[in-house]
Amino acid sequence: MGGTRCWLIELLRDYGFEAHLAHPLQYKAIASARLKNDKVDAATLAHLLRPDLLPEAWIALQQVREQRAVLRHRAQLVRLRTLIRTHAILADHGCDRTSSCWSAPGRQWLEELPLPTVSRMVVANMLETIDALQVVIDRVDAHLVQTAKADPQVKAIATLPGVGRLTP
């Protein structure tokens, strides 16, 4: 469940109500009515809930929802970093590097590359942005590692082949 509805779950619980989350795919199969609006949907959900026939999805605990929010945030930061297309500028000038531009030798190659002034400035700005994003990603990673240290499930999953501490 996304963070946008968490406040509603907490509000319902604060007022003494039990929150239910209908499983969208299973509910759709059950309640494929011709007339669809919020009032009809609410009535259908209530009718299914009374005899315990509502197909429910698990409502994650607050701690799990917070952990998911941090993981989504990290994924967004990484996606943002990958949107910075330095290679496109290099290709515009006929430059090609088969290995990484982000390693120490790659950065050295970029610095020595003869580029027009504007392209040099754009590449420098892009690298500065990538570096700034990396600082934030590293901070989020440190938080995730600290949070996951004590979790036995994380330790067990991390032993699987191909799964690391922060598998993308």
Image (cartoon, grey):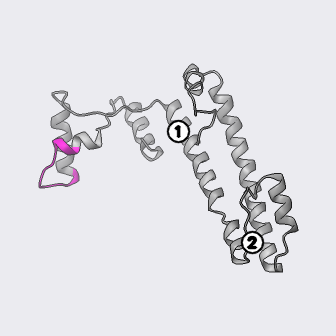
Secondary structure at numbered mark 1: helix
Task: Report the residue that reaches farthest toward the front.
Answer: 98
The residue drawn where x is 58% and y is 34% is 162
Residue 86 found in image quarter: bottom right
Image coords of residue 71 (percent x, y): 57, 41
Cβ atoms under marks 1 and 2 closer than 8 Å? no
Q: Nearer the viewer, residue 39 or 165?
A: 165
Residue at screen point 88% across, 67% down: 112
Sequence-first tag of 1 and 2: 1
Identify residue type, mark 2. Cys
User: Residue under circle 1?
Assistant: 68
Label 1, label 2: how far apart the Cα atoms are: 40 Å
- Label 2 residue SS: loop
Please provide percent x and percent y for residue 40.
Answer: 16, 49
Report the residue at 15% width, 27% height from top: 51
Magenta-drawn stretch, dominant element (helix, strand or loop): loop
The answer to whether residue 33 is magenta is yes
Of 38 and 106, the residue lying toward us: 106
- The answer to which image quadrant residue 8 occupies is top left
Report the disc number at residue 11.
Answer: none
Residue holding disc 2: 95
Could you tell whether 143 is left or right of 43 in the image?
right
Rendered image quadrant of residue 129: bottom right
Q: Is residue 91 magenta?
A: no
Left or right, 155 with respect to 23, comes to right
Q: Is residue 14 left or right of residue 148?
A: left
Q: The magenta stretch spans which residues? A: 28-38
Q: Residue at x 22, y 45 (%)?
A: 28
> Residue furthest toward the left?
34
At label 1, the amino acid type is: Arg
**Where residue 47 appears, x then y in whole percent?**
15, 36
